[in-house]
Image (spheres, rainbow, N blue to C red):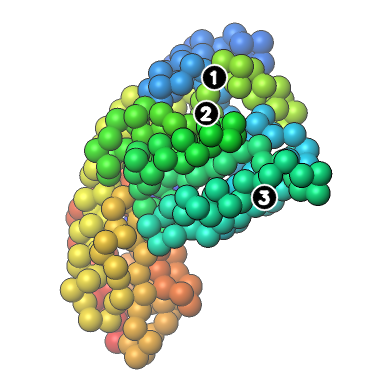
Amino acid sequence: MDFIDLRSDTVSWPTPEMRQAMADAQVGDDVWGDDPTVNLLQEQAARRLGKDAGLFVASGTMGNLVAVLSHCGRGAEVILGDKAHTFVYEAGGIAALGGVHPHTVPVQPDGTLPLNAIRGAIRPDNEHMPPTRLIALENTQGTIGGIPISKDYTDAVGVLAREHGIPLHIDGARIFNAATALNCPVDDLVEAADSVTFCLSKGLCAPVGSVLVGSEAFIARARRMRKLVGGAMRQVGVLAAAGLIALEKMTLRLQDDHRHARQLAEALADMPQFEIDLSTVQTNMVFFGLREDTGITPPELAQRLKEHHNILIMAGEWGFRAVTHYWITSDNISQVIAAIQEELP
Ligand SMILES: *Cc1c(COP(=O)(O)O)cnc(C)c1O
């Protein structure tokens, strides 16, 4: 890459192997179910996550939207975290397009939603209230450090959901980062979920796409909803070919990204100018602050790193976010640390 780009793992380019597989992909009309590469990706994704069926979608946002539309009718309610991607960063699509009412509960510093808050948010049968039709979790919890959510907690939410006859969806955009960090097989981790979305295009390097998995009946409904939102695509095996490599190979190397995130975090923790909670750095994200008496603001430091060192990092008055991925090496992290030392006043 031309830059050391730590803004997100979404910036990762497809690997040379992916580009070759895309060029060689067998294709068909996927709206007719005729694309063998898409079919293979959907089967393999479902098997890997321990579900019956899968559906290739254009993005994580589309996967979550299609999942919510497939679980909930108009006027229904979904319980989700107040820092959930679906609530904050998906343009309000579940409400705008689905007529689904979001009922938020606070995300805790450990990334979980308190069980009693979920229980308290489930609506009684009362004509004044929207019926609760879905509970949604996010793993890893992106907005607060990329924290992985444990199997025990997920199972406990699953028990609560089943007691009330409500399905559980997991926005697992980075579920393979969570499984890697927890050292837990991904199918065990999402066992309690009725549906899961995961991204092929973030740390897994595919250029485009996510997969939604669930039961055969659920995925049949989801196919219709994907069509409804304009997401049914034709010779999409050219994208699924990269997705297969993402799923088969890139899921097996995420511990490297996590090690590089720790490398950066530990170096920052040794510099008195920075504020960082090392306990939150468990996957590929590093959130950190800059002491106010440093004489430079985070956006100013980020600007200097860009201009003088070709290093891109997300910054605001709140601090910084750095995300590691396939194209960030251990040497790159050393370069970033040296550049920061050079640019600090
Ligand atoms: C990135 C992300 C999404 C959405 O994925 P896109 O492909 O960018 O639409 C959903 N949920 C979480 C937690 C994410 O990080």
Residue that numbered label 1 is attached to:
215
Q: Which element is circle 3 on?
A: strand
From the top left corner, tell me how far across and down residue 131 is, in percent: 72, 41
Q: Earlier in the sequence, mark 3 or mark 2?
A: 3
Mark drawn on residue 194: 2
Q: Which element is circle 2 on?
A: loop
81 up-or-down from 244: above or below = below
Q: Is mark 3 within 8 Å of ligand 1?
A: no
* Residue 76 shows in the view: yes
Q: Amino acid at mark 3?
A: Pro
Dots 3, 2 in contact, CB < 8 A: no
Q: Nearer the viewer, residue 68 or 242?
A: 68
Q: Residue at x 67, y 29 (%)?
A: 70
Residue that numbered label 3 is attached to:
102
Q: Amino acid at mark 1?
A: Ser
Report how far apart the C-alphas of labels 2 and 1 lie in the structure.
Answer: 7 Å
Does residue 63 appear left or right of residue 202 in this picture? right
Q: Earlier in the sequence, mark 1 or mark 3?
A: 3
76 up-or-down from 27: above or below = below
From the top left corner, tell me how far across and down residue 208 is, in percent: 52, 35
Q: Earlier in the sequence, mark 2 or mark 1?
A: 2
Does residue 102 appear left or right of residue 258 in this picture? right
Q: Nearer the viewer, residue 24 or 109?
A: 109
Report how far apart the C-alphas of labels 3 and 2 lie in the structure.
Answer: 19 Å
From the top left corner, tell me how far across and down residue 332 is, in percent: 25, 56
Q: Residues within 10 Å of mark 3 (few under 14, many from 20)?
A: many
275 up-or-down from 265: above or below = below
From the top left corner, tell me how far across and down residue 4 is, in percent: 34, 57
Report how far apart the C-alphas of labels 1 and 3 lie in the structure.
Answer: 24 Å
In the rendered image, the quadrant that contains the C terminus is bottom left
Q: Residue at x 28, y 53 (%)?
A: 282
Q: Amino acid at mark 2?
A: Asp
